[in-house]
Image (tube, rainbow, N blue to C red):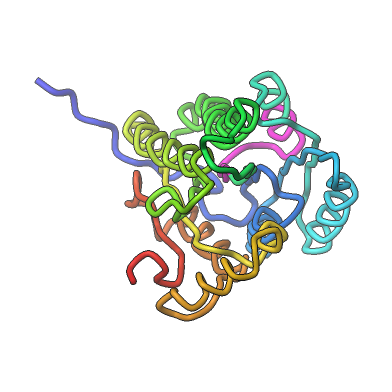
Amino acid sequence: MVAPRPKGQRVHGAEMKGNVAVVTGGATGLGRAIALEFARKGVHVAFNYLDLPDRDIGAQALLTETALRGLGVEVYCEACDVRSREEVDHFVQSAKAELGGLHYLVNNAGVARDGALWRLSEAAWREVMDTNAMGTFNCIRAVAPQFRAQHFGKIVSIASHQAFTPGFGISNYAASKAAVIGLTRSAAVELGASNVNVNAVAPGFVRTEMLSKLPADVVERAEHQAALGRMAEPEDIAHVVLFLCSEEARHITGQVIVVDGGLTIV
């Protein structure tokens, strides 16, 4: 005989205002847009960043932190490499202590190191897989005990349309995002009894700094191929992420929402 599952229970602060969101890679681009959207809803925000050899992410993190505080919420910011289990554990526990709780996790941190697979180095493969897939696992594993204990939590991971329709030279990126989708579905099964929703958003091309690194002809072709004939703005993705973290989406779990302007249907 199968034991009945406990019914979902609302916890104190289940409405978004006053809750706490963790957004990985929240200093720039899509992560920044998601963090700002949370702040507009009155959600306190913890975000991490990682300085890169060719970019001063720390300076941009400070600007993002200032913008978030300007929206009237509390903020916790820390340098953290999501590939490191120890660093992730420290970041999550510090965010919880500083902001007074944990309610939402958005796995946004990610990298791309493109190249034809017969030229792709092991280092490039491992960096992308470890950041995009292992990093997502590390963060879900870190918040799971708190979410299970309070019988409430929302997890949204950023996948990609390229997990379904990969192009040339992105075997590592496509594989990592396909892994994120598999992890999302598995985590939804394992955490569902604890009233934790786990979903993914798969964007198409989004107007961020990463897009500017692609060849102009690739961007133009994708824009014309999309059914809506345009690129997504970061806010287009952020709105869907916030919806999946809201009570309106309380019965959605284990799903992948493709937000690509119809790129993968034509």
Q: Is residue 253 left or right of residue 49?
A: left
Looking at the image, which is closer to me, 227 or 26? Answer: 227
Q: Is residue 67 left or right of residue 90?
A: right
* Residue 58 coordinates in the image, percent (x, y): 87, 44
Q: Residue at x 74, y 29 (%)?
A: 94
Locate residue 238: give its quadrant. Answer: bottom right
| Above or below, 104 relative to 186 | below
Looking at the image, which is closer to me, 226 or 106? Answer: 226
Magenta run includes residue 9: no
In the orientation shown, which residue stands out farthest toward the left?
A: 1
Query: Is residue 190 in view from this perspective?
Result: yes
In the orientation shown, which residue stands out farthest toward the front?
A: 118
The stretch in magenta equals: 92-107
Q: Residue at x 39, y 54 (%)?
A: 165
Locate residue 239: give its quadrant. Answer: bottom right
Looking at the image, which is closer to me, 190 or 235? Answer: 235
| Above or below, 178 relative to 167 | above
Magenta run includes residue 99: yes
* Residue 164 coordinates in the image, percent (x, y): 37, 51
| Above or below, 110 relative to 120 | below
Pick the quarter of the image with the C terminus: bottom left
Q: Residue at x 42, y 68 (%)?
A: 263
